[in-house]
Structure formats: structure tokens, C-alpha cells
Amino acid sequence: MVTLAVPYHLDERLPALEVGGVPVDREVTAPLPEGGPWQRMAVLYERVAEAVAAELSAGDGAAPLPVVVSGDCTTSLGVLAGLQRAGRDPGVVWFDAHADFHTEASTTSGYLGGLPLALAVGVGTPTLPTMLGLRPVPEQRAVLVDARDTDPGEHDLLERSAVVRSSVADLDASALPDGDLYLHLDLDVVDPADPAQVPDLLYPAPGGPALDDVLAAVRRVLASGRVVAVGVAATWHHERGAAAAGEDLVRRVVQAAQAVRRPEPPSRPRG
């Protein structure tokens, strides 16, 4: 397993991003240019894609499992681009209290962190995916887990899509897409009423599952042996001292990913 830290929320550098005492193998940063947020994030996520692809392409035998920890969910687009560059064709298992299925036309807030799952499956204006060379994941190979806090625009988009919906409790092997998997976990999926949850989330959503239930579901996905990368979105107010509880959650997720059997890399022609 290799741990990559991306200390950003969208295109803004975070004051700190701790991963619960887990050794970080690499911190991914980039000097971001002037310009719009998509252009700035494209520069950063190009670095993320390069790092993920390099880890998966190095050496023989079972590939390492990249665990990418960042301050929001859009980093997932860089991870997916890196997986594709390394010859993987991953489905997506997306744990989140929010659907992240807005488009630039449907969002009323303009918050770009509400778009990444839609962009990953080719819904909406593909400005950032095009910059990264990201091919859309087929909608039927994406599983959205929990997503209890969704907006009307997302309801309509999801109803017209083939994205699979699941609760945390119902998620088992039968609900997973075939082939390689990218496991994405936004820590706000846990009910904020759970005493173990981060107390200062950016967008808390009441009524969710308990932490232990989320971790059990994450372990079920990892137990498939088909997870090729894990993304952890540490979506709390990093400047307000909430890191202690958040770091513990990140640490427990990373520990669950350790010692998991890795899928073999794609065979390469000899010549």
C-alpha cells in the first residue's frame, strides 16, 4: 500500500492535512497557475494522475494499492485518470452523504465539489475530464452508497442515469460492479450524531449510518480483492482544530486497506 496526500480543497491549499499518524509516502502538490478553478485543478490533478499511474505501473506482480487522501471529492477525477493510464478500467463505489451528481447547469450554489461523480460518469460539461484525458466510467459500473442529502437537480439526473444506488447496510459483493474497483469514501457519509464522527464537517448530513457500519461496508468492498485504489475525502474544517477525530477516521480506513490482496496488473505483450 502507498499513501498519497493531496493537501487541497478544490484549488485551495489547506493549512494542514493529517492522516492519523499513517506514514505518507508522497505529498502531491503543484504550483497552480492564475485562471479559473477547472484550469487550476487540472494542473494539480495531472500530478495526482501521474503519481497514481506511476505507482500502479512500477514493478512486477501484484500492484501496490494507492490510498489518496485529500480535502474534497474532486481529486477522485485525477485518481481515475491515473488508473486508466495504468491500464485499469475501474468501476466506482462511492460512499458519500451527498450524491455529488450536479452539473454546472443544475447546481444552484456553484460549488464544484458537488460535481465529481457526475463528471466521472460523463454527465455534465467535461471541462476537467477532457483536460485529464479521463474516459467516462459507464454509469452502470458506478454504485452510489448512502447519498441521503441530495438536491432536486440531482434527483432528476440520477433518475435518468443507470447509476446504482445502495445503502451502507445493503452493500455486499452482489452490488459491486465487475472488474477493477475504485473505492471512494467521503467521511461525511457517517452520521454526525455518532460520537466518533468528525465534529466540524463542512457539510454535515444527519440521519446517516454509524462509523462502525461504514467501516464494515468498506471492508466488504476491500475483501473483494478487486480494489485498485482508495480515495478518502477529509471534508472537515481543517483550520478549526477538528483534525484529531478526523485523523482517527482516516487512520482506520487506511488500516482497513492494509494487507488486502491486490489485483494483478494487466498483462503486457512481450516483444
Image: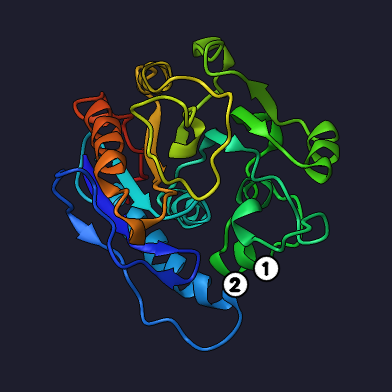
| Mark toward the viewer: 1 or 2 | 2
Amino acid at the residue labelled 1 = Thr
Helix, strand or loop under label 1: helix
- Asked whether residue 215 is in view, the answer is yes
On residue 127, the disc is 1
| Between discs 1 and 2, the one toward the N terminus | 2
Against 167, residue 184 (above or below) is below
Against 69, residue 1 (above or below) is above
| Horizontal relation, residue 131 to residue 202: left or right | right
Q: Quadrant of residue 224?
A: top left
Amino acid at the residue labelled 2 = Trp
Farthest residue toward the bottom? Answer: 34
User: Contact, CB < 8 Å: mark 1 with mark 2?
Assistant: yes
Identity of the residue drawn at 50% across and 12% down? 172
Q: Label 1, label 2: how many angstroms apart (C-alpha)?
A: 7 Å
Judging depth in this view, the residue of 200 and 133 nearest the camera is 200
Quadrant of the frame with the N terminus: top left
